[in-house]
Amino acid sequence: MLAALVASHAAEPDFSKTLAGKNDNERYRLALEVLRKSDDPSVFTKDQDAQVVEAAIDACRERLTDVGENPSTKIESLANNLLDFAADAKSPPALAIRALHAVAESHSSFGGRISARVAQLAHNPDYPSRVDAIQVLSELADGSQAATLAKLVNDKDKAVAEAAKEGLESIKGKGVTQTFIQSIADKTLSDETRTALLRAATKRDMTAVVPVAAEVITEPGLRLDAQKALLRLARKSDLVQLRAACAKVPEESASAAALKRLIAKLEKE
């Protein structure tokens, strides 16, 4: 029992040199040096010393960098602890944001668990760092979160809406293409959300959405953006879908005329 207690005490970081630092920069550097050797630096985000907290976040960041597809439970614990700190209203705002972006360094959704937590922060209207949460969400390699970003494109907060738009155009990860396709087709989602997906898919040159764009062009609320997607993304191999779409839109509409021109162009290729 005594031996275990001594071993536990010996394993605790020694911040005596840190506290003796001449200024904040030196104290941060000394704290980081100590925490790099710690078994779990995320614990010290609860420290009262701001330099120790900052160093703890950065020590975690180093361990989270590009952790791969199957991170360990210990690494996931670091990410969760950083998110606890980032979500705590008592955390200094600058350090909370630093913790959020440290999580993004993992480029991993941790099986969707970590990305889901970040999505909750992004959706919370009372969370003060929603823009940062959105930026992090687009970097966690969870393509399914494209739907989350699309829902935020029309948020009342213009900064949030703009960040979501940018995130939607850049998000990568497993399932991103399938999420775009399924969400564009999903009539339970608002026209605004589906339009955001169509616009982002067009900017991304996501040719895989051509079939679904050809389907939803019949819906008045989506027609213009579906048309734009088809004009930019459709290829000769898509002629069957294009002809079917053209037959379904009003004969005298601008969309019908645009589709006819596109079909004629592709038939000559």
Image (spheres, grey):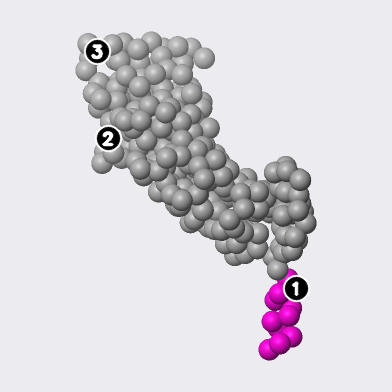
Instruction: Specify whether 173 is left or right of 244.
Output: right
Of the two numbered discs 1 and 3 on the same chain, state the one appearing first in sequence: 1
Does the rendering let one see residue 74?
Answer: yes
Q: Nearer the viewer, residue 210 or 90?
A: 90
Crowding at mark 1 (Cα within 10 Å: few <14, some 14-19, many 20+): few
Q: Helix, strand, or loop for circle 1?
A: helix
* Amino acid on which disc 2 is placed: Ser
Question: Which residue is painted at 31% across and 30% down in the image?
Answer: 156
In the displayed structure, 215 sits above or below 267; it is: below
Q: Nearer the viewer, residue 109 or 260?
A: 109
How far across and how far down the image is residue 27, in percent?
Answer: 73, 48
The residue pinned by badge 1 equals: 10
Q: CA distance from mark 1 to mark 3?
A: 78 Å
Instruction: Look at mark 2 in the image and give the residue it sits on.
Output: 190
Query: Could you say which is closer to the camera, residue 61 or residue 183?
Result: 61
Q: Residues within 10 Å of mark 3 (few under 14, many from 20)?
A: few
Task: Please state the horizontal and vertical placement of residue 29, each as a whole percent of the image.
Answer: 75, 47
Taking the magenta stretch, the answer to whether it contains residue 5 is: yes
Give residue 253's mark.
3
Q: Dot 3 lies on which element?
A: loop
The residues colored magenta run 1-11
Amino acid type, label 1: Ala
Among the two numbered marks 3 and 2 on one chain, the one whose residue lies closer to the N terminus = 2
Of labels 1 and 3, the one closer to you:
1
Please say whether residue 57 is visible from this viewpoint: no
